[in-house]
Image (tube, rainbow, N blue to C red):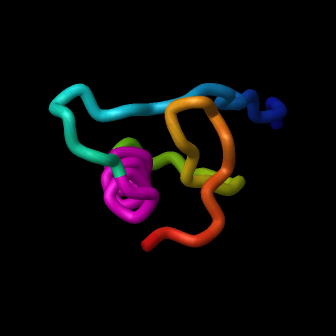
């Protein structure tokens, strides 16, 4: 059996419509996309600000 090859993601996604992009909204859309392709995702997601700093508590 051939060993599986994958892709490691390293980057940031921001909305261009002037609204904040929540981790929940992004993760729902991302996982839906991944599952539609028959793929799976192993990893985590973090909410960040415009400077790339992690946001732990979202008001």
Is 58 included in the stretch rendered in magenta? no
Most foreground residue, 41 or 51: 51
6 vs 19, left or right, is: right
Q: Is residue 35 magenta?
A: yes
57 sits left or right of 19 in the view: right
Which quadrant does the N terminus fall into?
top right
The residue lying at 53 percent from left, 42 percent from top is: 49
On screen, residue 15 above or below 55 = above
Residue 52 in the image: above or below residue 44: above
> For this view, does 48 lie left or right of residue 3?
left
Residue 4 found in image quarter: top right
| Quarter of the figure with the C terminus | bottom left
Range covered by the magenta-colored residues: 22-36
x, y percent for residue 21: 34, 48
> Which residue appears at 16% of the width and 31% of the height?
17
Name the dominant secondary structure of the magenta segment: helix
Instruction: Write the residue at 51% across / 46% down.
Output: 39
Quadrant of the rendered image containing residue 25: bottom left
Nearest the eye: 27 or 54? 54
Residue farthest toward the left in the current orientation of the protein: 17
| Residue 9 percent across, percent down from the top left | 65, 30
24 lies above or below 43: below
Q: Position of residue 27 (x, y in %)?
A: 43, 57
**In screen coordinates, is 47 left or right of 3?**
left
Identify whether 24 is placed above or below 32. below
Total numbered badges shown on the rendered structure: 0
**Foreground residue among 13 and 18:** 18
Which quadrant holds residue 55?
bottom right
């Amino acid at each position: 059996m051939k060993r599986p090859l994958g892709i490691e993601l390293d980057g940031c996604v921001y909305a261009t419509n002037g609204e904040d992009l929540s981790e929940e909204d992004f993760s729902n859309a991302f996982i839906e996309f991944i599952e539609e392709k028959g793929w799976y995702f192993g990893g985590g997601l973090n909410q960040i600000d415009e400077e790339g700093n992690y946001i732990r508590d979202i008001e």
